[in-house]
Amino acid sequence: MILRILGVCLGLAMAAQAAADTLDINLHNKALRATYARPVGDSQGLNMDVGLLYSRKYSDNGYVLHGGLQVAGMNWSEQGDFSISLGGRAVYVDIGSFDGGHVAFGGNVRFSPIYRVGFNAALYYAPEITSFMDADSYTEWSLSADYQVVEQAFVYVGYREVKVGVDKGGSFKLDNRAHVGVRMNF
């Protein structure tokens, strides 16, 4: 099931002509995430991404599917390079009998103070007004440090928390652990 969902997401994303695409895969003992990102058309700075997070934290396995659009760019300072993206994601969460839909807003920042080393932070949030079905909120944040092994590949370690608020009270934390990953640009 998980491979079919991932295959469909990646197949749809790759249907367009490939150029400056990124594949990011990270995991730990209880979760796996794969994200594919690419520029939209000939636009400068508009990117789309699709991804899947599979979590085995609960007795019912959890899935988080997302598709998003972000405006991205570089910002330089005397301290180092900043890569920044801002935008939104449509997010679908499935945990057993729980289903939630969200429109989450946020972004990412990567700071590289020295050559080949970077520090990353990301935050996406959907309040009650943009959450649907059984959910009343969605929060995802992550921190990581990466190293550029070769020109087009990074390895990293990080920490991520994905939390979904439930309409009737309470919440699910689908992921809240450290992970390792690789990001490939092609």
Image: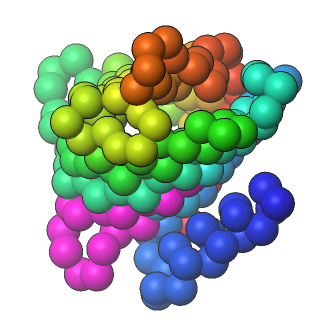
Classify the position of the N terminus by image quarter.
Answer: bottom right
Locate residue 27 relative to residue 40 in the image: left or right. Answer: right
**Is residue 158 visible from the viewing direction of this image?**
no
Magenta region includes residue 47: yes
Image coordinates for residue 63, horizontal then vertical, percent = 65, 43
- Name which quarter of the figure residue 185 lies in: bottom right
Which residue does the image show at 42% across and 33% down from the upper left?
Answer: 135
Q: Please name the residue shown 62% across and 25% down the image.
A: 174
Q: Decide whether residue 122 is among the magenta residues.
A: no
* Residue 100 x/y as whole percent: 47, 42
Can you say whether 35 is above or below 182 in the image? below
Q: In this view, which residue lies farthest toward the front? A: 168
Q: Is residue 100 left or right of residue 186?
A: left
Q: In front: 60, or 108?
A: 60
Give the left or right position of residue 16, taking residue 14 as reference: left
- Asked whether 133 or 85 is in front, the reply is 133
Find residue 154 and report its horizontal and vertical position in percent. 60, 40
Q: Which residues are magenta?
A: 38-51
Q: Residue at x 50, y 32 (%)?
A: 116
Left or right of residue 126: residue 44? left
Residue name at image x 35 percent, y 28 percent: 137
Q: How many marks?
A: 0
